[in-house]
Image (cartoon, rainbow, N blue to C red):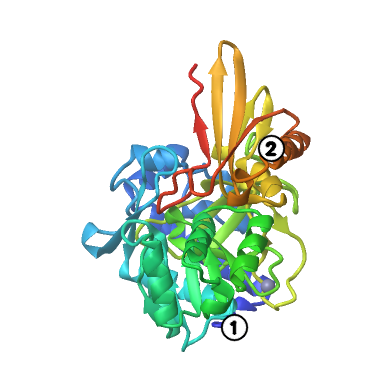
Amino acid sequence: MYWEKDIETMDRSKLESLQLTTLQDTFIKAEKSYYYGKTFKEKGIGVSSVKSLSDITKFPFTTKDDLRENWPYGFIAVPKEDLVRMHSSSGTTGRATVVFHTAKDIAVWTNMLTRCLYMAGMRKGDVFQNMMTYGLFTGGLGFHYAAEKLGALVIPAGAGNSKRQIQLMRDFATTAVHVIPSYALHLSTVFEELKLDPRKDTSVKIAFLGAEPHTEKMRKKIEEIYGYKAFNSYGLSEMNGPGVAFECPYQEGLHIWEDNFLVEIVDPKTLLPVAEGVEGELVLTSLQKEGMPLIRYRTKDLTRMIPGQCACGRTHRRIERFKGRTDDMLILKGVNIFPMQIEKKLMDIAGVGTNFLIILNRQGYNDDMMVKVEVHKQYFSGDLRQLEALRKKIVEELKGELLITPKVELVEPDSIPKGEGKAVRVIDNRKD
Ligand SMILES: [Zn+2]
């Protein structure tokens, strides 16, 4: 049931004292980097300032901008020749940031992700098809190494090429996949095209959904189409990549591996800690990284800590599945909107297909939102009144959720462009 029972079920007080030791160690390592060396000196702080875990709040936050401004080597804490790998963020917002690893960093990351895969039920003997982009993006090599360490047979399929994905899945009886949720939905339309039923014509039992925050509705829809169990995976390249937090079979939040990370949740405006169970921005300090340790890194991801212990017996706390990033939030007519709210509503409406796109426009001083929604093919043949009725229903549902009235256009399946990576959900044409 556990990959590393001692660590996964470690008594909280023992876990916290381990965190303190590794935190102090992290400060000693971090100080060797150009950026932290300079910052510690300026603020008159250092390892001697850390007597307890709560002393972390004496230190300033590290942001993505700090990483960009000290690009490329300002954060490395070991001689460059000790680095063995670099990865970069997917650059969802702004310039991509780079992260460097020593051999030990890769081993620690791999082991932590192996822990996740084992927790979700993957075992030696499984055939694992990794449908993520290989290369600078961490989802490819990260999962690849972990699945091999577990002893699975790995098919490094990479992203895209949908017909070949299906062929591989069928020819080699794939039992587990790693896939971007919006791509899983897109792939289901290709199964349809080939007149195949993913439930009957494949052997996949487990899917790891990563790289894209998604709603519970979307998970359910994917599980229904494929007949497998889908697990939510969370990570960010600045903290290795996938494997930071992961669902166990109880799926009541994601266990965050506290032997690797010191976790804080702060109010994104005041930057002060929130009370337990209250939503805020996730802030992480790496506890085991040596190539590029990061202290109080602001992830921009919004979540909350789930109180209480999980029935699976793991003592590492759980964070709630992600509602979105502070960066993703749209402001329209003074109203805060997350694209995930729209996804959640759409996934509930019968007839809605697998993709949607939000377009924001400005005319004079008036902003408006257009939501393009793919719907099932049959709506476009025969009685078009049904199409109009569905459109009106979607407008009403979104209005109820968002408190503003969006324009809605219904389009045929596959008419919204779909790349190989994360889905593009928002196009903002508003110019100041
Ligand atoms: Zn659990």
Residue 412 located left or right of residue 103: right
The local crowd at label 2, few if under 14, some if 14 to 19, many if 20 or more residues have their Cα within 10 Å, is: some
> Vertically, is 152 above or below 344?
below
State the residue at coordinates (43%, 83%): 152
> Vertically, is 241 above or below 351?
below
Residue 263 located left or right of residue 154: right
Identify the secondary structure beneath mark 1: loop
Q: Quadrant of ligand 1?
A: bottom right
In the image, residue 77 lies at what x, y percent? 33, 55
Mark 2 lies on residue:
391
Residue situated in front as seen by the camera: 325 or 61: 325
In the image, residue 382 lies at what x, y percent? 64, 45
Q: How many marks?
A: 2
Q: Residue furthest left?
A: 81
Mark 1 lies on residue:
2
State the residue at coordinates (62%, 28%): 331
Q: Which quarter of the rendering shows the N terminus?
A: bottom right
What's the residue type where badge 1 is placed? Tyr
In the image, residue 165 lies at what x, y percent? 40, 68
State the residue at coordinates (53%, 49%): 413
State the residue at coordinates (38%, 52%): 31
Question: Can residue 266 be seen here?
Answer: no
The local crowd at label 1, few if under 14, some if 14 to 19, many if 20 or more residues have their Cα within 10 Å, is: some
Residue 73 located left or right of residue 160: left
Query: For residue 305, what is the image quadrant?
Result: bottom right
In space, the residues marked 1 and 2 are separated at their CA atoms by 48 Å
Residue situated in front as seen by the camera: 112 or 25: 112
What's the residue type where badge 2 is placed? Arg
